Image (spheres, rainbow, N blue to C red):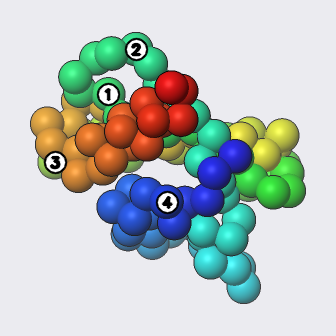
Amino acid sequence: MYILNKTPIFLEFLKRFMNKAGYVFKDENIQNRLFLHSKCNCKQKDCATVYLKSKKPFKKESTGINIFNTNKGFFVVHILDDGFFEFEALLYKKYPYKKEIDKFFNKIEK
């Protein structure tokens, strides 16, 4: 797991999205709770899915799937009780963070 501060563009995008979507991390900064785990390797140009992991498992009432249809694309937030957090972004023309995430994980894989 890697700290979100290593990808500042993604961190800022995630914070803004979570705030607008109504997700609240009570008494915690998101970067203290979630960590980068991996990215989707489907190689689709319109995919920028990132898998995050929480230090501690999520409560049952917090788990589930929420789909957000924006004017720029779809976002799927899938929260699992084992602490995984899938931030799926589809059909989005310009991901502000895609190059940063690709570069970060490609550097780690080498």
- Asked if labels 3 and 1 touch by Cβ distance under 8 angstroms, the answer is no
Q: Earlier in the sequence, mark 1 or mark 4?
A: 4
- The residue carrying mark 3 is 71
- In the picture shown, does residue 18 fall above or below 109? below
Q: Are marks 3 and 2 in contact (CB under 8 Å)?
A: no
Q: Position of residue 102 (x, y in %)?
A: 36, 35
Q: Amino acid at mark 3?
A: Asn
Q: Nearer the viewer, mark 3 or mark 4?
A: 4
Instruction: Give the x, y percent position of residue 69.
Output: 30, 43
For badge 1, the amino acid type reads: Cys
Are the residues tagged 2 and 1 within 8 Å (C-beta)?
yes
Q: Residue at x 16, y 48 (%)?
A: 71
Q: Which residue is mark 1?
A: 47
Give x and y (percent) for residue 31.
60, 68
Residue under numbered circle 2: 42
Q: Which mark is residue 6?
A: 4
Instruction: Determine whether label 3 and label 4 are within 8 Å by CB.
Output: no
Q: Which residue type does callout 4 highlight?
A: Lys
Cα–Cα span, label 3 and label 2: 23 Å
Q: Residue at x 43, y 57 (%)?
A: 7
Spatial separation of the CA atoms under disc 1 and disc 4: 21 Å
In 3D space, how far apart are the residues under numbered discs 4 and 2 (Cα atoms)?
23 Å
Of discs 3 and 2, which sits in the foreground?
2
Residue in the foreground of this view, choosing between 43 and 18: 43
Residue beneath the point at 23% across and 27% down: 46
- Residue 72 is marked as none
Q: Is residue 86 above or below residue 46?
A: below
Q: Earlier in the sequence, mark 2 or mark 1?
A: 2
91 or 109, nearer to the observer? 109
Q: Would you say residue 47 is visible in this rendering?
A: yes
Report how far apart the C-alphas of labels 2 and 1 lie in the structure.
Answer: 8 Å
